[in-house]
Amino acid sequence: MTDLDIVGIGIWSPFFPDWPAFCDGINNGNWQSDAPLQPGLIPPRERRRAPQSVKMAVEVLDQACSMASVNPASAATVFSSAMGDMQITDYLCRVLVAPPRLVSPTRFHNSVHNATTGYWSITRNSHAPTSAISALSYSASMAFLEAAVQATEEDLPVLMVSQEMAAPAALGAICPSVNPISLALLLSKPGLFSAALATFRFGIQRKSADWPALHPDLDEPFKGNFGSGLLPLLAAIASTSSVPSNVPASFEFPLSKDACLTVSLKDRENVGAQL
Amino acid sequence: MSLVITGYTATSALGCGVECIQGSILGNHSGLRKNDFPGCDLETWIGRVSALETTLLPRHLEHLDSRNNRLTWLGLQQDGFLASVFELIDRIGVDRIGVVMATSTSSIGRTEEAYMHLDDSGLFPAKYCQPEVHNLHSPGIFVAEATGLTGPSLTISTACSSSAKVFATASRWINHGLVDAVLVGGIDSLCLSILYGFNSLELLSPGPCRPFDIRRDGISIGEAAGFALLVRKDLAPEAEFELLGYGESSDAYHMSHPHPEGKGAVLAMEQSLKRADLSASSIEYINLHGTASKANDLVESYALSQLFPTQTLASSTKGWTGHTLGAAGILETVMTLESMKHGLLPGTLNCEHPDPEFKFPILTENTQKPIRIAMMNSFGFGGNNASLIFGRLDD
């Protein structure tokens, strides 16, 4: 078991465009319904061309780094999404159904799973390692584990992203994601940054676990969404209500049918109350 | 902690298993052929796995059917690799072995097929409703199910560096104590997205690719599956090879062009040397990324010139296999290990007139030389770079 700090959080969905909005929803029930996605980091001209997966990831990565006042070039990145950019997959597969099969070169190079971290490293001029992974329904928990292990073993802050787009109609039957969501956590060894939002301990257990229940208001929009699994952890950090009355401080996130990731929050700032 | 490799295999256009690699190199016989991929009329050459056309999945894996998973299954059967996985399972248990796979396009070939058969409501017909296939983790799911492994499992997809990075992730997992061993691998199969996509970027050569040649005019796409077992050294004292170092970096330059000074490539190689605690001069051979694109080869040779003495032997093997994208890192790792095993360094097939603009000499002819320490480079779109160093252990 190892201790790590969460030093920055970024989050975006149509219901909560950033961390203060998420805290407002968790603590006061104030949710938005159609929040725009306009990552300030991407210049407006580029923003039109950037695919949605990139815009979502860059937005939450930027939020997490800003919150922690961390130079993004010093942090490694682990991006995760079960399905990648489903709008581009849908586009490619439709174009390729019949001749002339003319593929847009820009959309093709944006189709790589690591387009998100590629744009991020270019925008922030970061030469730090970046990875892009999938573990299908376990993408969120495996990305958390991958980032936590990297932060521990390599002594550098690691940004992790858990993201899923809304599935286009044709892919709906194989992917249950109805609403887009992206969230980022910046993890580091304790002591590297003064302002930790929470300190946690993580490990693996050989037992099956169900995903922790989502906040009642978020259950309907995000149930079964491959990118929403870590929301209960963020809700616990956001919550201003006293511990442990209604918010668990220890979590089990499934990694497979018969293993789970345990994350125990040791102490946390009353973040929601400060905002 | 020292990590060793107890088993490895690769299947590519050269054939199934490692014996085909040695035979092809000795005979200077390329696996590339004129494009004959069904549904694709592009004028280019491809590295197609012939045996794949008659490969079927066993009944218990049929629900995972796709060209990519058939290639995975075919690859797992070679070189006694599955037997070495089962032997390790008997000793340490299914839950102490992780699965870290790599791919660029996963089973998208199957998704393309599904779109050609959408029903009247625009949905997948029942035959194609395979949630465990139409996603980026399809290789990891397939390998875990085919082997029975229950340790942590994920699939890395960082374009053409994917299956070099599996060694970095696996090292961290083992060093952290999450697992004692990791089955690493990479699989990419021919599909329309890749062929027409690279064509749209004007990166396909009309003929067999010519890495580092002055007349090089683009890449040849190939397909491959490769696997290795990375194990804690104390669990495998007899192992022949060890992983000495890895490096990962980003170019921070452009989505599909390498950094003009090879900054990310240099950083990845420097980091792997640092982890291995080796000087650049102790690297005896480098298996290069060497795609035969104008930009990659120029930049990679410039990156080499910044670090290595010119007597370091370096070649690209893509003239034999084509560029196998997300499988390139593991295929070329296996080719590098075979080079060390047999003391036969592959030249750069199809490189007849090395580009005089290069700042670093390229090994063009096959060379017999026993070596103990070798490097393998993989660079990908998004400016994603990885470099690995392997050592041959005492006999």
Image (spheres, rainbow, N blue to C red):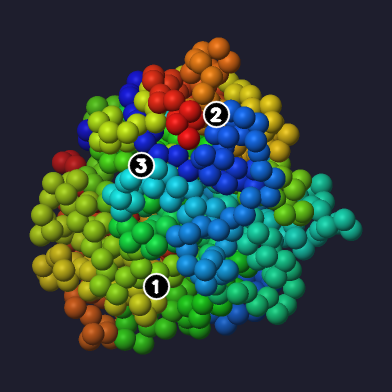
Observer-side mark, 1 or 2, equals 2
Instruction: Report the front residue among B328 and A159.
Output: A159
Residue at image coords 23%, 47%: B245
Q: CA distance from mark 1 to mark 2?
A: 41 Å
Residue that label 1 marks: B257
Residue at disc 3, secondary structure: helix
The amino acid type found where label 3 is placed reads Ala
Residue at image coords 44%, 79%: B218
Instruction: Examine the rendered structure and indicate whether residue A253 appears above or below residue B367.
Output: above
Residue that label 2 marks: A235
Q: CA distance from mark 1 to mark 3?
A: 32 Å
Instruction: Report the front residue among A195 and B9.
Output: A195
Is B27 situated left or right of A57 in this image?
left
Which mark, residue B235?
A: none
Residue that label 3 marks: A68
What chain letter is assigned to the residue under label 3?
A: A
The amino acid type found where label 1 is placed reads His
Residue at image coords 20%, 61%: B285
Residue at disc 1, secondary structure: loop
Q: Quadrant of residue A144?
A: top left
The outermost residue toward the front is A274
Q: Quadrant of residue B362?
A: bottom left
x then y, percent, for residue A26: 59, 30
Residue at disc 2, secondary structure: helix
Q: Number of callouts in the render?
A: 3
Instruction: Report the front residue among A122 and B372.
Output: A122
Visible in this render: residue B338? Answer: no
Visible in this render: residue A57? Answer: yes
x then y, percent, for residue B165: 37, 49
**Number of residues whose C-alpha sits closer than 10 Å to that of mark 2, classed few (under 14), some (14–19) or many (20 or more):** many
Instruction: Report the front residue among B285 and B382.
Output: B382
